[in-house]
Image (cartoon, rainbow, N blue to C red):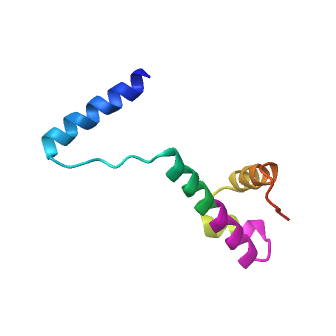
Amino acid sequence: YQAKQLISRKKDDINQESGTEIAYISSKSAGNMESVERDHILKVLEQVGGNKTKAVEILGISDRALRYKLKSYREAGFDID
């Protein structure tokens, strides 16, 4: 709660100084970003025929990160080969 107040206060300070509004990522937007990331990862995997080594090179992530993401997608009920 205190962090939320601090962010709100800082937002107001910045808005007053600059005269502009600050856009904050809502939880809905964050969920949407996760969806975009998941779709991109799965599309890359499809394009490389499931080759995880090629996929991590294209995605610029570690093989461990890819394994973690795929595991979390499976646990969330997505059909991952």
Instruction: Examine the image and state in which quarter residue 58 appears.
Output: bottom right
> Residue reaching furthest top?
2
Q: Which x, y percent locates residue 6?
A: 33, 26
Split into 4 quadrants, where in the image is the C terminus?
A: bottom right
The residue lying toward the viewer, choosing from 73 and 46, is 73
The residue lying toward the viewer, choosing from 54 and 6, is 6
Q: Which residues are magenta?
A: 38-54
Determine the residue positioned at 73% across, 70% down: 45
| Residue 37 in view in this figure | yes
Determine the residue positioned at 38% across, 46% down: 24
Residue 4 colored in magenta in the image:
no
Q: Is residue 47 above or below residue 24?
A: below
Q: Is residue 20 above or below residue 5?
A: below
Q: In the image, is 29 to the left or to the right of 68?
A: left
Q: Is residue 12 above or below residue 55?
A: above
Magenta stretch, main secondary structure class: helix
> Residue reaching furthest right?
81
Split into 4 quadrants, where in the image is the N terminus?
A: top left
Instruction: Examine the image and state in which quarter residue 34 appears.
Output: bottom right
Determine the residue positioned at 79% across, 77% down: 49
Q: In the image, is 58 to the left or to the right of 12?
A: right
| Residue 60 in view in this figure | no
Determine the residue positioned at 15% across, 39% down: 16
Q: Which x, y percent locates residue 59?
A: 62, 65
Residue 39 colored in magenta in the image:
yes
Number of disc labels: 0
Q: Which x, y percent locates residue 10?
A: 27, 32
